[in-house]
Image: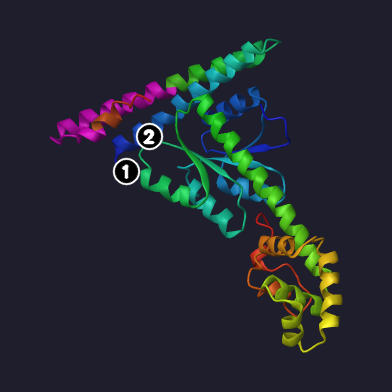
Amino acid sequence: MTTLETLAHELRQPLSAILSNAQAAQRLLAAGGRAAGEVREILEDIVACDKRAAALLRHLEEALRASTRAGEQPESSLLRQAQGEQV
Amino acid sequence: MSLSADTLYIVDDDAQARAALVRLLRAAGYQTRAFGSASEFLEAHAHLERAPGCLLLDLAMPEMSGLELQQALCRAGCRRPIVFLSGRGDISKSVRAMKGGAVNFLTKPVDARELFAAVEEALAIDAAERSAWVVRHGVVERIATLTPRERQVLGQLVSGKINKQIAAALGTAEKTVKVHRSRVMRKMHAGSIVELVKLASLVGIQSGISPLLGASAPTAPAAVQPSRH
């Protein structure tokens, strides 16, 4: 796998964690009761995951710049991946 | 949501993704057990094979990938249904996963509704396989109570022979065959020949030839060995 592919792939982990965490929190809140403690933990994780995703994006941008400097034209499919597929 | 004792075994090397999955599934009422690597899971699973449930496997893990874990389980005769989670670029891998008995293949990030649907499907398959195994196991146990002679008669009956033919084939009197035949029917809990044939086919006896009918006392042979062992 190229660096770009790896980074794009890696982005899925925090994004996945953010979605599952958020949906878990929605369920906990919908169920009522005292979910505040767990929801607080979930929100902390969402923030951490978001930061991780942002860091990956920075690496991705660097990798893209480096490949452009080297005169390589990233394949369009790779570029799409690097730009983050909308799922 | 699921009210049974089913357990969802989650194997994902990414701690954040794993914790999030566990939270989501628990919030939906599922019982979960999470593992950070395939080997960690395999070690624990050795004691859990008979527990009902399904697997949620991350495809791309260091050391042992999800597919390699699937193959290891396959080799060990474990047919616990698997839901794979992965990035999108793995189409050929996904086909391989499907062939290996995977129930579904989801792309991260996966929506809760999609995840629950896949999990329910996997649990239903697991439950069906388990009850089928119980039935097959019952038939094997009944066959084990037959004498070698009765097993021969069972084989003949299943291949559609009538008493006279069976007597000729086994070199015995038709009257004796009748006695054996009624014992076979009773021990197999079969009310009719049709029922007997059905029971026999459940354990792979179709033409009257099977290691189950061999002269030696039947230990459960590979063909009817519990699928999850």
Picture layout, residue A37 above or below residue B117:
above
Picture layout, residue B134 above or below residue B200:
above
Q: Chain of mark 2?
A: A
Q: Amino acid at mark 2?
A: His
**Disc 1: which residue:** A1
Within 10 Å of disc 1 (Cα), the crowding (few <14, some 14-19, many 20+) is few
Check whether the beta carbons of the residues at disc 2 and disc 1 lie within 8 A of each other.
Answer: yes
Q: CA distance from mark 2 to mark 1?
A: 10 Å
Task: Give me the residue at 82% from left, 86% from top.
Answer: B173
Q: What kind of element bears circle 2?
A: helix
x then y, percent, for residue A50: 44, 19
Query: A26 or B132: which is nearer to us?
Result: B132
Within 10 Å of disc 2 (Cα), the crowding (few <14, some 14-19, many 20+) is many
* Extent of the magenta region: A52-78
**Disc 2: which residue:** A9
Query: B97 or B154: which is nearer to us?
Result: B154
On the question of residue B138 being in view, the answer is yes
